[in-house]
């Protein structure tokens, strides 16, 4: 049975998940992403730091702070895992080259060097990031309501997506890199032509700020989550609303399972803020016990193989969740609930000398969604806010 199938079975049967505390930030965890082989987990926090941790051991392999000013609102590992991108409250985007180096005692460590600082947003805090699958193009959104497309190689600005009337909290790129989705404090989701920087659809079903967006890895489905306590599923080609899911809690972040797209992982408010929806079983909802985390979940991520998932919460804790064997004990609550294929890619942001997993193709682009503590975005997006 594949790793993805094991996870799917564990979710369906309401199995116990092993919870491993990977790292503890001093403030809210706003963003996270796995390296392609899931041997490293990148997290960004309101404490002004970015960490690269080993999710298996909890080892802190790298910490970045000091170069950038203010809170870290978005961060991601490039698809080739040779660089880390950080978006901050000072309005700048920092790109770090990463490499593994050997120390004097032959220990292996991860090192980072600042490659470039992008300042296309002026002094407006940068809240969201997304990158194409080939790592050539970066997109960023800010409190200035603008979205900027950047060339990752040169740092040059390639264009702007103009139209939102509130802060741009979340971004995602479609599996074929032709569409960009954005969620905003103006209560809309917009779908854009990635090449032309033109708006194709403005989606207006939400009545609250849109914190998270993500594209399905196989089908024409775009998911959006809002503090109106709903998740909307759209056809991004036509703009049609396919389904509206009532969560009864504010939705701060979401991500589809990257291979099958069967599950939608969400971070919300409430007593059990970590939840999963089964796209194949009428959006059955599973509530995950997260005993090592407290409060709202602002960042979630699936491992590329769908073997595990991680969550970051307002208490600063980053926790890895893996199926516990045997799968007959209960740590999830099932409200209404297949096999998949394993996937992994070579990753320079890994332990040097570690065995490489077999490579399979991953569709779409990486994204990092922002859920802000100082926020804003209601109506015109200028008012202060917290995620409540």
Image (cartoon, rainbow, N blue to C red):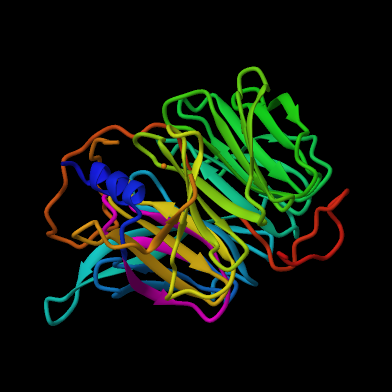
Magenta segment, principal secondary structure? strand
- Residue 132's x, y, as percent? 47, 36
Q: Is residue 129 above or below residue 19?
A: above
- Residue 304's x, y, as percent? 32, 46
Q: Is residue 170 left or right of residue 81?
A: right
- Look at the image and say whether residue 76 sits in the magenta stretch: no
Q: Nearer the viewer, residue 13 or 319?
A: 13
Image quadrant holding the N terminus, namely: top left
Q: What are the residue bounds of the magenta stretch?
A: 18-43
**Residue plotted at (20% across, 38% down):** 359
Q: Is residue 158 left or right of residue 5?
A: right
Q: Nearer the viewer, residue 99 or 328?
A: 328
Q: Residue furthest top?
A: 238
Q: Is residue 95 above or below residue 174?
A: below
Name the quadrant containing residue 387. Answer: bottom right
Q: Is residue 244 left or right of residue 297?
A: right
- Residue 352's x, y, as percent? 17, 61
């Amino acid at each position: 049975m594949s790793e993805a199938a094991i996870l799917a079975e564990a979710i369906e049967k309401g199995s116990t998940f092993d919870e491993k505390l990977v790292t503890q930030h001093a403030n809210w965890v706003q963003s996270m992403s796995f390296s392609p082989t899931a041997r490293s987990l990148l997290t960004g926090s309101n404490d002004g730091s970015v960490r690269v941790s080993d999710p298996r051991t909890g080892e802190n392999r790298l910490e970045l702070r000091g170069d950038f000013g203010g809170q870290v609102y978005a961060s991601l590992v490039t698809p080739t895992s040779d660089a880390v991108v950080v978006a901050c409250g000072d309005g700048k985007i920092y790109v770090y080259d990463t490499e593994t180096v050997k120390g004097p005692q032959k220990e292996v460590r991860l090192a980072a060097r600042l490659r470039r600082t992008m300042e296309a947003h002026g002094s407006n805090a940068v809240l969201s990031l997304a990158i194409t699958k080939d790592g050539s193009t970066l997109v960023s959104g800010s409190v200035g309501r603008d979205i900027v497309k950047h060339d990752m190689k040169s740092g040059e600005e390639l264009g702007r997506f103009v139209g939102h009337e509130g802060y741009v909290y979340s971004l995602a790129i479609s599996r074929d890199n032709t569409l960009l989705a954005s969620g905003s404090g103006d209560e809309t989701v917009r779908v854009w032509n990635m090449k032309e920087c033109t708006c194709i659809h403005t989606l207006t079903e939400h009545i609250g700020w849109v914190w998270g967006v993500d594209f399905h890895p196989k089908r024409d489905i775009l998911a959006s989550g809002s503090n109106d306590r709903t998740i909307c599923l759209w056809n991004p080609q036509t703009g049609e609303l396919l389904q509206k899911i009532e969560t009864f809690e504010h939705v701060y972040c979401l991500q589809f399972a990257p291979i099958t797209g069967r599950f939608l992982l969400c971070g919300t408010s409430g007593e059990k803020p970590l939840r999963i929806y089964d796209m194949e079983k009428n959006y059955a909802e599973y509530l995950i016990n997260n005993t090592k985390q407290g409060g709202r979940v602002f960042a979630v991520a699936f491992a590329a193989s769908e073997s595990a998932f991680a969550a970051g919460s307002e208490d600063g804790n980053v926790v890895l969740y893996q199926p516990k064997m045997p799968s007959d004990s209960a740590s999830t609550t099932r409200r209404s609930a297949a096999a998949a294929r394993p996937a992994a890619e070579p990753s320079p942001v890994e332990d040097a000398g570690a065995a490489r997993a077999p490579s399979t193709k991953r569709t779409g682009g990486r994204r990092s969604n922002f859920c802000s503590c100082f926020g804003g975005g209601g109506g015109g997006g200028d008012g202060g806010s917290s995620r409540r």
